[in-house]
Every structure is written in C-alpha cells, then in structure tokens.
Image (cartoon, helix red, strand yellow):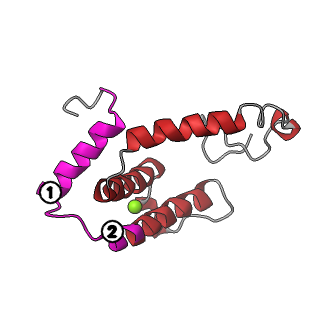
Amino acid sequence: MDNPQEPITLAELQQTVDQWIKTIGVRYFSELTNIAVLMEEVGELARVFARTYGDQSFKKSDHAYNLSDEMADVLFVLVCLANQTGVDLQAAMRANLEKKTRRDISRHRDNPKLHQPNKDQVDSSNPGELQ
Ligand SMILES: [Mg+2]
C-alpha cells in the first residue's frame, strides 16, 4: 500500500490495518469493544446519510463528518474484527458474492419493481438531490 494510487486488495488491507494496530494502535481493543465501536461508526455514517439525503439538517457540529471518511471508519473497525477473529475477508467476499449470484441469479431481474425508476435514488453527481 505504498502507492496511494494503486488498488488495494482486501488481504492487503487486512495486513495494513494489522500493522497499524500493532504499531500506532499498540494492540487491538477487545472484540466486544470493537463491535461496540463498529456500531458507533455505523451510527456516525447513518447521521451523515440522514442529514445529506434524509430530512434532517446539519448542525454546526455535524460539519466535521463526511461520508467517505465515515465509510472508511466502518471498514477499518470491520477489518479489525476480521483480523481478530481469523476471517479472510477476500475469501469471505468471494464466497458471499458467489452465494448471492446463485441465490439471486433471476430474482432481481424478474422483480418488476426494479424495472421502475427509483424515486429515492440519489444522483451521485449531485449528492443531496433525489432524482
Ligand atoms: Mg467515524
């Protein structure tokens, strides 16, 4: 992960986070602490969504939050938990996508609701605006 322009695999991310924890972070928080921290971070992400795409407005104190950073916070703690519990996220994601593909090969394609425009879809070129 020396070149920030290069894509990073999940395996590399797990290694990078592990190195960070063992040097900068000293050691992992307990698994129970980290699952609580994960919930906190998901809450912070939900707060950004509620204020950016939902009906709530930002308070002055909310402006420190940003979507990409909150997603990275969630991913970081999830990677910590994977490292602590011996989960290979790369293998897990491959298996998960294969499972979803087998299960949903025609399910979504055959769902008439998905062939209608999504009124709640956010235009990613104009965040905060619904299409
Ligand atoms: Mg956060």
Q: Is residue 28 left or right of residue 115?
A: left
Residue 106 is tagged as none
- Residue at 33% in and 58% down: 85
Residue 31 is tagged as 2
In reply to whether residue 42 is colored magenta, the answer given is no
- Residue at 45% in and 60% down: 63
Tag 1 residue: 22
**Image position of 109 with respect to 80: above or below:** above
Indicate the secondary structure of the residue bearing disc 2. helix
Specify the principal SS of the magenta part: helix
From the viewer's side, name the closer residue of 75 and 67: 75
Looking at the rendered image, the quarter that the N terminus falls into is top left
**Image position of 3 with respect to 35: above or below:** above
**In the figure, residue 3 lies in which quadrant?**
top left
Q: Residue furthest top?
A: 6
The spot of residue 56 in percent (x, y) is 64, 65
Q: Is residue 94 left or right of residue 14?
A: right
**In the figure, residue 108 lies in which quadrant?**
top right
Q: Is residue 92 left or right of residue 108?
A: left
From the viewer's side, name the closer residue of 61 and 68: 68
In reply to whether residue 11 is colored magenta, the answer given is yes
Given the image, on which type of amino acid does mark 2 rest? Glu
Q: Residues within 10 Å of mark 2 (few under 14, many from 20)?
A: some
Q: Is residue 60 left or right of residue 104?
A: left
Instruction: Confirm or deny contact between disc 2 and disc 1 (CB under 8 A).
Output: no
The spot of residue 5 in percent (x, y) is 30, 27
Q: Quadrant of ligand 1?
A: bottom left
Q: Which residue range is magenta in the image?
A: 6-35
Given the image, on which type of amino acid does mark 1 rest? Lys
**In the figure, residue 88 lies in which quadrant?**
top left
Q: Residues within 10 Å of mark 1 (few under 14, many from 20)?
A: few
